[in-house]
Amino acid sequence: MSERILLQGNEACALGAIRAGCRFYAGYPITPSSEIAEVMARELPKIGGVFIQMEDELASAAAIIGASLAGVKAMTATSGPGFSLMQEAIGYACMAETPVVFVDVQRGGPSTGLPTRPGQGDIMQARWGTHGDHPIITLYPSTVEEVYELIIEAFNLAEEFRNPVIFLMDEVLGHIRESVTLPPDEDIEIISRKSDEEFEEAEEIFLPFEERENVEVIPLAKMGKTRFHVTGLVHDESGFPVGTSNIAGKLLRRLENKIRLHADRIIKYEEFMVKDAEILVIAYGSVARSALRAVKMARLDDIPVGLFRPITIWPFPFKRLKELSKHISGVVVAEMNLGQVAREVSRVFKSRQHFELVSRVDGELISPSEILDAITKMYAGMTEF
Amino acid sequence: MAINIKQLTKEFSDPLSIGITSGHRLCPGCAAPMTVKMALMVAKHLGYEVVVGLATGCLEVSTTIYPYTAWSIPYIHNAFENAASTIAGVETAYRALKKKGKLPVDKPIKFIAFAGDGGTYDIGLQALSGAVERNHNFLYILYDNEGYMNTGNQRSGSTPPGSETTTAPVGKAIPGKLQLKKNIVEIVAAHENVYAATATVGEPFDYMNKVEKALKFEGPSFIAVLSPCVRFWRIPEDAAPSITKLAVETKYWPLYEVEKGVYRITKKPRSFKPIREFIEKQGRFRNLLKHPDADRIISELQDYVDKRWERLLALEEATRDKPAR
């Protein structure tokens, strides 16, 4: 039987990453994520891993890309201000198709903002923070146990799609302590880096960015096996920079397709009592816990309401929401920002009369009663006539 | 100006007149507010008006807790890495205002940036170098507490070897931080036309004299002030002055200045104490002292500070009357 232990969200993140095979961490202290670095600094040397504290977030992000290209699973963790500084490297990792994990434990922003308080204002930065069209995967758990399991998934997705994965948390989730049952080994799937057997036998010039039929993700070159040219410039299949428009267009579309064509494999969500629901509450991260409570309370009053919790934030689960929209009349979105996910949701529920945003940006977690109020009011409005 | 404490006490009997007031939330015994207070008293005493810029850090968060502020002078905080860039922008803006006739040309205004070691040795180094190279007229005061104390004691480029931090814990596999701290004064002094000095709160007259020199210097100036964090150095609340005095007496923190390439040691103790004495007085080295490699690490550090002192003496001799420009 697995043991039950008391863990903080940030600790769970670090320990889960180690379980996923992360053996390189480069980072820079920032509230409320510093505990992740502290656990890594303590644990990685014991198992032959490497922890480096860098001189800033630019360096941290660059270091994990270097480590990953050298063949090691690598990650960094930060919060909003540091995440802003990492954006250039995130774009580079997309372009160079490097599997890395960036953890962002969100606090109130913008700028230095509210360093010790929760926020969810980095949803769009996770998607569009770096310039240019680029593929991105973003996950966002809502319990400590899920942090542990999902960070493993983050590493798996990074390796499978040779892409950076953004792992969002928030201050509440980072600092909350919960009893956690760590999954036994047989329940954990760990995806290791793909290698190209054919190539290793043939020993030709390896083409790590080659376009192959029906294959969007090409295995990375193995360190020491071949000459490997990596650049943030638009490049051909060998990795050498080229400026021709047909190659540039093809490359960007292939990068986009890596995620777009496999969205079903990537997207995860959780639903609670949505089958007969007329009102759908949408919330994620620590706010989803308040939302779950609010939905349970509303059900006691016989209000037909359900909860939809996106676990994968990007790519956004449009398809499932479209299906749900067929029998949903009203939507309540609860988030600690000014409506970043609500804007995405409104693209699906365009014509709905009943659309309510429960939003807080004052560094306080949204409470169940605030969400319940919104549900009750909406239901009253819907049943009036 | 010979600084006279009695005179300063009288001059600044009104606490609001200094520029930083009591009632801020820094820990009792923290050396950072002493660093600020002494510098501002000197500036005001000399008749300057002061604009301050702060980097993110303990000093910034603890002196500006909403809805209060401990600052009674113009103040700007931007981000962690850009105190030098921000104060450079402010200095330029004031110059422009004077040029446009919106401020009297002869109004004596000085620009002081305060930043910790994280915001100076590490993330802010590029901004500092740029501002010094562009020859802005400002004073940059580093309060060096040798770690990221605001976020709970992580190692920085200034943390000494063997010091216990959360990201360089002293353990069996690794005896804490292995690297020596950067020599930040040498880095700044390597720029052209700059005044750079070390100082510490345990030697207030030496520090205040340097502030005066720095403020009067035509161009960028920099003072690195060894400024203990009582919390994470694990020392008693009243120990910051005595421990930094000891830092000078053990050659851990030699007091000197470099003005346009000319070195001058400002304090030469008649006799020195072993570095071990400085280490044993602080709880942050407790685990190092228990480590099997402690003797080797401490003797290497002793060797390092001895050699650095000899080198400083030689530099003083070699650069006498030979300014770089």
Image (tube, coloured by chain):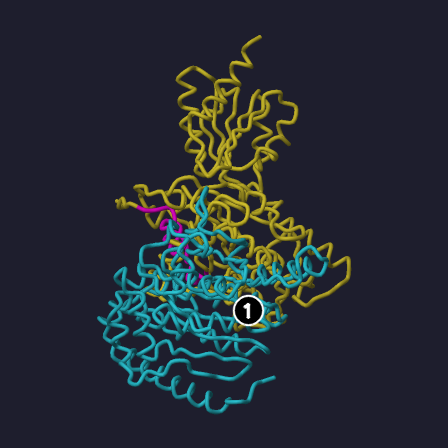
Chain colours: A yellow, B cyan
Taking the view exactly as shown, the residue that stands out farthest to the top is: A385
B245 within the magenta span: no
Question: From which residue to which does the magenta span run?
Answer: A7-27
B231 sits to left or right of B121 = left
Q: Which residue is mark 1?
A: A200
Q: Which quarter of the rendered picture does the C terminus of chain A lie within?
A: top right
User: Is residue A339 or residue B136 the one in the foreground?
Assistant: B136
The residue lying at 57 percent from left, 72 percent from top is A226
Q: Quadrant of residue B82?
A: bottom right
Q: Amino acid at mark 1?
A: Glu
A332 sits to left or right of B14 = right
The residue lying at 30 percent from left, 74 percent from top is B246
Q: Is residue A110 above or below residue A248?
A: above
B144 sits to left or right of B132 = left
Q: Is residue A123 above or below residue A68?
A: above
Q: Position of residue A22 (x, y in %)?
A: 42, 58
Q: Position of residue B200 (x, y in %)?
A: 38, 70
Binning the other alpha carbons within 10 Å of mark 1 as few (below 14), some (14 to 19) or many (20 upward) gives some
Q: Which quarter of the rendered picture does the N terminus of chain A lie within?
A: top left
Q: Is residue A285 above or below residue B75?
A: above
| Subunit bearing disc 1 | A
Q: Quadrant of residue A290?
A: top left
